[in-house]
Image (cartoon, rainbow, N blue to C red):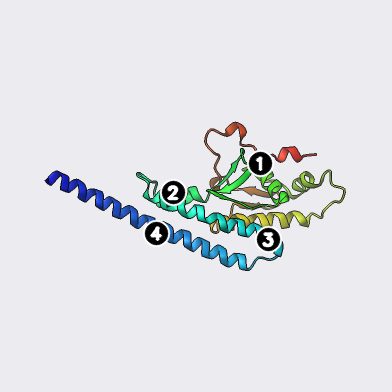
Amino acid sequence: MGAEGNSLARLLRDAEARLIESRRSVDDALDLVRRASELSQDAPAAGEAPALEAVLDSHREELVGLVLSALEKGAKPRELRNDYFNSLVYRPEENQYRVGRRQVGLTESEKHVLDLLWQAMPQPVSRGNIHQALYADAAEQASMGTIDVFVSNLRQKLKLASGGRDFIHSVRGQGWALKPEFCRHRANSADSAEPEADRHRA
């Protein structure tokens, strides 16, 4: 009975520790959703509402994932788990980007810009190269300032999806680059992990 009692006590202590960790994870997720909701109320344009709504809605899956990962036997330390959930990943089978498990709602132009940055990572992509890739075959040419708007919107959407992480680095005189330490390639997908940006090139 003594051995069984010790085993039960260890099991209960382990369960208590994991439940405490899961409670912290839930609190983190709820805080993230509240902050995202506040940001959505300050959306600069009505056209941003659908994308913001999609990002906010996807936080429900993240909440479940945080709880399950906290309860998972042999789970990673909390900091490493948060890094995983907030990493940017490209899913070739869906042709879309996610931050952890959350889909990032992007316009076609924003998606194209992110494709270019992803392919060039960790090297920067210039404003001129992005403009050329987007408008080489267009009947009407947008101004260079339009590229700054796309990058700004993209940066804000990625921050919103990750709880504030800045994925895009501005390189003075060279353009913009994704931070590779915040991005991860999915396992066993190296041959198919390239986005479709090259399809749009002139």
Residue 109, image x, y percentages = 73, 50
At label 3, counting other C-alpha atoms closer than 10 Å, the crowd grade (few under 14, some 14-19, many 20 or more) is some
The dot on residue 48 is 3
Quote the CA–CA distance across marks 2 and 4: 15 Å
At label 2, counting other C-alpha atoms closer than 10 Å, the crowd grade (few under 14, some 14-19, many 20 or more) is few
- Is residue 53 visible in the rendered image? The answer is yes
Horizontal side, residue 13 vs residue 146: left or right: left
Q: Amino acid at mark 2?
A: Leu
Q: Earlier in the sequence, mark 4 or mark 3?
A: 4
Rendered view: 198 above or below 64 = above
User: 91 or 153, which lies in front?
Assistant: 91
Q: Amino acid at mark 3?
A: Glu
At label 4, counting other C-alpha atoms closer than 10 Å, the crowd grade (few under 14, some 14-19, many 20 or more) is some
User: 181 or 74, which lies in front?
Assistant: 74
Question: What residue is pinned by disc 1?
Answer: 120
Q: Earlier in the sequence, mark 2 or mark 4?
A: 4
Q: Say if mark 2 contacts mark 3, CB within 8 Å.
A: no
Question: What residue is pinned by disc 2?
Answer: 80
Element on which disc 2 rests: helix
Rendered view: 200 above or below 151 = above
Quote the CA–CA distance across marks 4 and 3: 31 Å
Q: Say if mark 2 contacts mark 4, CB within 8 Å.
A: no
**The C terminus: image quadrant:** top right
Residue sitting farthest toward the left: 1
Question: What residue is pinned by disc 4?
Answer: 24
Element on which disc 3 rests: helix
Q: Nearer the viewer, mark 1 or mark 4?
A: 4
Residue 181, image x, y percentages = 54, 46
At label 1, counting other C-alpha atoms closer than 10 Å, the crowd grade (few under 14, some 14-19, many 20 or more) is some
Quote the CA–CA distance across marks 2 and 1: 26 Å
Q: Amino acid at mark 4?
A: Arg
Q: Residue at x 59, y 41 (%)?
A: 91
